[in-house]
Image (cartoon, rainbow, N blue to C red):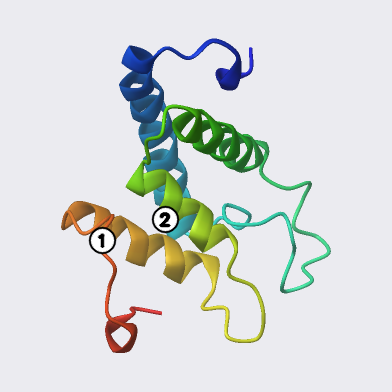
Amino acid sequence: MDPRDEAQPGQLETLAQVFSDQLLACLDECARGRKGLFSDVDLLGDEGSGGGWPEAAQLRELALALQGVFAQHEERNALLDEFLDLCSIHGESHPGERRLARSFLERIERGEVGSQPEKEKLPW
């Protein structure tokens, strides 16, 4: 079932908690070295790395769907928004998924998710 189909306003909190639980589990695994949480793109060209990370791909799909659900109810979810922002970081200055995951986990633990860090204080 697509979460956009039948989400009631009271269900948004439940959907956000499910997303949060899955995100924290994936962030922990990524911080320990698993690649593929923030993008399917293999930035390092590891040919023998296996077939990707299906749970991470599902989490990104869920995040996009939930962002649409929250928008329909004219609400936002900071954790969701920041995760999708991190998924959009690519290029030469990309800090690496492991580093991004550790930094994001630390920000979540400090309760800083949703606040905009100053440019010079970005951890990556």
Circle 1: element type: helix
| Mark 2 vs mark 1, CA separation in Å | 11 Å
Return the x and y of residue 10 as percentages of the image width and height: 32, 13
Front of the two marks 2 and 1:
2
Name the residue furthest left: 110
**Which sits earlier in the primary sequence, circle 2 or circle 1?**
2
Q: Are marks 2 and 1 in contact (CB under 8 Å)?
A: yes
| Above or below, 76 relative to 14 | below
Q: Mark 1: few, some, or many residues within 10 Å (few <14, many ≥20)?
A: some
- Residue 56 vs residue 90, the one in the foreground: 90
Amino acid under label 2?
A: Glu
Circle 2: element type: helix
Tell me the number on the disc at residue 82. Answer: 2
Q: Quadrant of residue 58?
A: top right
Q: Quadrant of the C terminus?
A: bottom left
Return the x and y of residue 102 as percentages of the image width and height: 36, 63
The mark total stands at 2
Residue drawn where x is 50% and y is 60% of the image: 85
Name the residue furthest right: 47
Name the residue furthest bottom: 120
Tell me the number on the disc at residue 107. Answer: 1
Amino acid under label 1?
A: Arg
